[in-house]
Image (tube, helix red, strand yellow):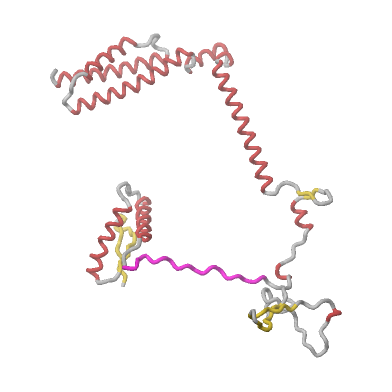
Amino acid sequence: MNPKEIEAQVNELEERVERLRALYDQYFQGIEKIEPLTLRKDVDRRLWQLRRIKISNTVVRFRLQGIVQRYNTFQQYWMRICREIENGTYHRDLAKAAARFGEAATNTAFGRKRQAMFEKGLQKQVERQRKKQETMASLNGTEATSTPQGDVTAPEEAAAASPQVPFASLEMPAVRPSSSGASGTRLAVDLPPPSDAGKAPAGVFAGPKISPLNRNPFANPSAPAEPPSRPGPRPVPPPSPFRGDGELSDARLRQIYAEYVEARRQRGESTASLTYENLAKTLRSTVPQIKAKHKVKSVDFEVVVRDGKTMIKPVVKG
């Protein structure tokens, strides 16, 4: 069989597959009363004959493969709809039966079982959601608290019943160094004086007891004390982008790669062929050339946009 005859048979097969699809659509809509099995057997026979022929033309062979794949997809769809029609679960037949006998009469035993399972699962989901809300409410302290006398008070009332002592009003004993012995320097604690009965004798100066932690000796004694200010965290210097030999570090290369990819994505440029390994290899191979040209010790890079394109620009360091 010559190539022209094979191409003509492929064209005819494609037309018959399309005709068969239209007839099945009419059958499912109720226009055709019987299934078009005669035309389907003819399509199967033609397809079997063409698949036995060795086709040398690549274009015709590709068209035949596409027709075969499309026909297989149609067959799966037709088998599923025909099975639903035989089982009485096709939506067109159910709609007709519901319009004639009512919605309850069209619900099969399998459909009723599925409906009961769905309602049971929905009820369990609502119960789980309610238990979750109760657990979150108890963790947040929304439940009432009980006092030792058995009275029930709200959390706000319980907090108001127990007054809080401010940190600034707590007096700390003064600490002074004592005599040093064999074990080293010791610390002596000056306890605050008791009541008026324990006043210091005449001629001895008894200054005010000032806490070394939360009192300022130069501040007004009548002013309220303030809590001590704690030193903040020490600023951490940023890591150096260069290694000991003056080359770019792996962390800096990954930062440049991330900035470059993000800039290209924001401008709608493709990043499919862009990888970290290729970019790092290119930048490291470019550094010696720039050093030799500009007579510098180290070279850094930054991402810039020039003439509507995203690129990486070298930055020489002295």
Q: Quadrant of residue 239?
A: bottom left
Residue located at (47% from left, 13% from top): 87
In screen coordinates, is 209 left or right of 122?
Answer: right
In screen coordinates, is 180 left or right of 297?
Answer: right
> Which SS type dominates the magenta stretch?
loop
**In this view, 161 is above or below 10:** below
- Which percent across, then down, holds residue 246? 31, 68
Query: Which quadrant holds the C terminus?
Result: bottom left
User: Is residue 233 in the magenta section?
Assistant: yes
Residue located at (36% from left, 54% from top): 263
**Camera-nearest residue between 217 and 197:** 197
Query: Which quadrant holds the N terminus?
Result: top left
Q: Quadrant of residue 176?
A: bottom right
In screen coordinates, is 283 left or right of 176?
Answer: left
**In this view, 58 is above or below 259:** above
Q: Quadrant of residue 29?
A: top left
Q: Residue furthest bottom?
A: 203
Q: Give, as a single range, the part of the protein colored magenta.
A: 227-245
- Which percent across, then down, holds residue 47? 25, 17
- Which percent across, then down, holds residue 312? 31, 59
Residue located at (60% from left, 70% from top): 230
Residue located at (15% from left, 20% from top): 4
- Which percent across, then down, holds residue 161? 79, 57
Q: Residue furthest front?
A: 182
**Camera-nearest residue between 80 and 231:** 231
